[in-house]
Each structure stands twice: as structure tokens, then as C-alpha cells.
Image (spheres, grey):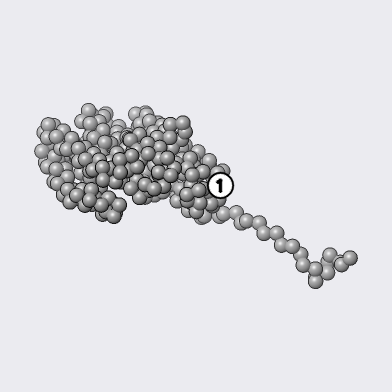
Amino acid sequence: MRDLHDPSVATPVIIRPARPNIRTLLRHSIALMKPVTWFAPAWAFLCGAIASGALDWSPLTLGRLALGILMAGPVLCGLSQVVNDYCDRDVDAINEPQRLIPSGQVTLRHVYILTVVLTWLGCSMALALGREVALFVGLGLICALSYSMKPIRGKQNGWIGNALVGISYEGLAWLAGGAAFAALSGQSVVLALLYSLGAHGIMTVNDFKSIEGDKLMGIRSIPVQYGKVIAARLVVATMALAQLGVIIALTLWGKPIAAGVVGLLLLIQLVPYVRFVRDPEHNEVFFNATAIMLYVWGMLAAAIGLAL
């Protein structure tokens, strides 16, 4: 028998996976939270705050505004993205195994801890901004869970899923922004509902790039249910009707300048509307950069008009 201490005897090397460092954990956490999605609710919160007519340049007001934008965008929207990825992990293991959770780059323990931290942060921020804000945040969390989790899993149907996202990302975020600074007016509520309707159409735009995958997974998105052409028409009709409603409301409320600005922005959107209906798949990027951007600028114009 050879001596185990003999240097000529090869010693087996046990390779243990290195623990991810803090920087890697932070990078993975932010990736799960999908920063590209934070803009919509953060913008809606800002518009709701402006519509309240109670904003000023005092440090306290600006601090509350920054806290609300941080809450609506990175924290709560980020939380909804983490929950969605967690609920989709089994499907992603088949369709997109390279994603963070199915590939094992992020453990379920990491997801659980991140979810708890974001939930605690979001609820704490909401309470700091007031009970009414906390109510809207609670309703938004219910929508987010209903969108992703069984047994409801609203994302399985385009009408239900898009409505849940539109209400939480636009309507509830707008109302939270208004309630953080003043008592909500009926006019602000009407605008929040109208822009939630338009957001339903915007959400459908994202479904054109995954039609085949949605068919295989049994997800009945709007394009899957009605085909590309009809779905594209529904997108532009929904967005246009929502903005027409805003224009009519602003006009009735004696806000002609704001109504005119929203009307002009809607008129310019007709060009991307036509291109999108003709070929939705190849004009999605153009539509996002033009029609949807003009839509969100219209939100700001309507909010300013309501405040003046």
C-alpha cells in the first residue's frame, strides 16, 4: 500500500461553489426587480401629486415626493416583478432556463428575503405618507398578487391581467400620489380611471412579441385571442378613447388649455397608430418610443391643467 503522505499520490480536489458576494447579490436583486418597469408607476405617482395642486418647493414636500416616487417605482413595482418571476419559475425553467431563478443564479431563499424586505419597505413608506396612501398600496399589492399567483393568476387572460396591471401601475399610483399631498378630488379620480383604461391598451403592446410562447403555455393574451390585426386595433382604440375621455373631462371642467395640449398630443399619435395597426410586430419599438411617450406626456399635461 502506498503512503498517503507520498507527494506522488494525487489528492482529490473538492470544488465548492463560491458564495456570491454582496455586489453580486445586489446586482441580481436589481435585475429581478426589472428597473425598466419602474417608470410607469413612478410617473403616475408624480402626476397624481401634481394634480393635487398642493406641491411646492419646500424641502418637506420634495422629500415626500421623492419618497413616494421611490415607493411606487423601485420598491413596489420591483416587488411585483420579483413575485411574478417567482410564480413563473417552473414555466421559465422550460422556456427561458437562462433566467436568474431557473438557472440557479438566484436561490429561492434570496427571493424570499428580497420579497420580505421590499414588502416591509413599501408598507413602511406608504404608512409614512398617510393612511389613504397605505390603502391604495394595499390594493395595489392585491392586484399584483392576483396577476401572478394561483388560483386567480390574472395574467392567463389578457383582459383580466392587463386590467390588473393598468389599475395598479397607473390608477392606484396616481391616486396614491394625490392622497399623499391633499384630499382626493373627484376630478383626479376620473383622470386616474381614464389613464388606467389607456394603460390596458399599452400592456397589450408587450404581448405581440410572445404570441407563440403564450399559445404553447395557454396564456390567452389579447393577440392570442383575436390575432395581430384586431389586437393592434384594440390597442390604439383603447388608448385613443381614454385620451378622448380626458379631453372631454378637462373641457367640461373649464381647462381648455390642458385639453388642447392633450388633444394635440393625441393627434400626433395618429401616425404611430397607423403604422402599428399595419404591422404591429415590426413597429413595436417605434410605437413605444412615440405613441406611448406622447401618452405619458399627456398625463403630465392633464395633471398640470387640473392643478391650475
Disc 1 element: loop
Quadrant into which the C terminus falls: top left
246 or 235, which lies in front?
Answer: 235
Q: Residue furthest right?
A: 1
Q: Is residue 181 visible?
A: no
Question: Would you call the spot at circle 1 few (<14 residues within 10 Å), some (14-19), or many (20 or more)?
Answer: few
Residue 162: quarter of image: top left
Quadrant into which the N terminus falls: bottom right
Q: Residue at x 29, y 55 (%)?
A: 282
Q: Residue at x 46, y 37 (%)?
A: 119
Does 2 appear above or below 270? Answer: below
**What residue is disc 1 on?**
107
Q: Residue at x 67, y 59 (%)?
A: 15
Q: Is residue 255 visible?
A: yes
114 left or right, relative to 135: right
243 left or right, relative to 171: left
Question: At label 1, which amino acid type do we have?
Answer: Thr
How far across and down, in percent of the image, does residue 27 sit? 48, 53
Q: Residue at x 57, y 54 (%)?
A: 20
180 or 213, which lies in front?
Answer: 213
Does 104 appear above or below 79? Answer: below
How many badges with numbers are in the image?
Answer: 1
How far across and down, in percent of the image, does residue 163 sit? 33, 35
291 left or right, relative to 98: left
How far across and down, in percent of the image, does residue 195 sit? 25, 37
How far across and down, in percent of the image, does residue 34 sit? 41, 48
